[in-house]
Amino acid sequence: MDLARRLVLASLLGTSLLLTACKPAVQEIRIAAQECRFEPAQIRLRAAQPAHLVIVNEGHEAHEFTSTLLANPLVRVLAAAKPAEYREAASFKIPPGRSVEITLQAPPSVYVFYCKIKGHSAMAGTIMVE
Ligand SMILES: [Cu+2]
């Protein structure tokens, strides 16, 4: 590797380290609701960093994302972008083609999520926060 290439790589590495240091990294998690499962169903998050969850209904039916994560009062919700009418306690009813977004920070635990709609009990997963 010649010197110019090394310098470019070193400066790219330096820039990315600088960006990492200046901005608190947000974990980006996309969960797709389909008939009849959530993809992915196993999610791991770091407790030290905020997480931006996007839950997208890719199916043809409505699905309802319900989670102990949303019910936990120790979970800090930093931002939420969703039609207000879809929020019911710890649950979001999501019509086909729509999504909800929520940014939060959660203490370490294992949280479950599932679809509340009758006949959709196969739609379930876990969010492990470490
Ligand atoms: Cu469902």
Image (tube, rainbow, N blue to C red):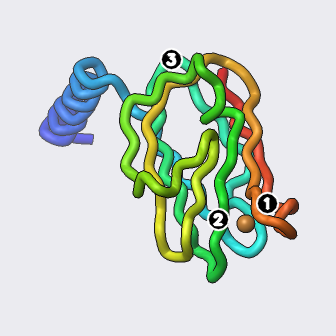
Q: Which quadrant would residue 61 be assigned to in this image? A: bottom right
Residue at the spot of label 3: 48
User: What secondary structure is marked by label 3?
Assistant: loop
Question: Residue 89: percent from the left, percent from the top?
Answer: 61, 40
Residue at coordinates 73% horizontally, 52% vertically from top-left? 41
Q: Nearer the viewer, residue 26 or 113?
A: 113
Q: Is mark 2 within 8 Å of ligand 1?
A: yes
Q: How many other residues sit within 10 Å of disc 3, few (<14), some (14-19) or many (≥20)?
A: some
Residue at the spot of label 2: 33
The kind of residue tagged 3 is: Ala
Q: Earlier in the sequence, mark 2 or mark 3?
A: 2
Residue at the spot of label 1: 123
Contact (CB < 8 A) between labels 3 and 1? no
**Left or right of residue 99, residue 43 in this image:** right
Q: Does the residue labelled 1 lie within 8 Å of ligand 1?
A: yes
Quarter of the image where ligand 1 sits? bottom right
Question: Residue 109: percent from the left, percent from the top?
Answer: 72, 22
User: What secondary structure is marked by label 1?
Assistant: loop
On screen, residue 77 above or below 74: below
Q: How far apart are marks 2 and 1 (CA)?
A: 8 Å
Q: How far apart are marks 3 and 1 (CA)?
A: 28 Å
Question: Residue 98: percent from the left, percent from the top?
Answer: 47, 69
Query: From the image, which quarter does the N terminus lie in?
Result: top left
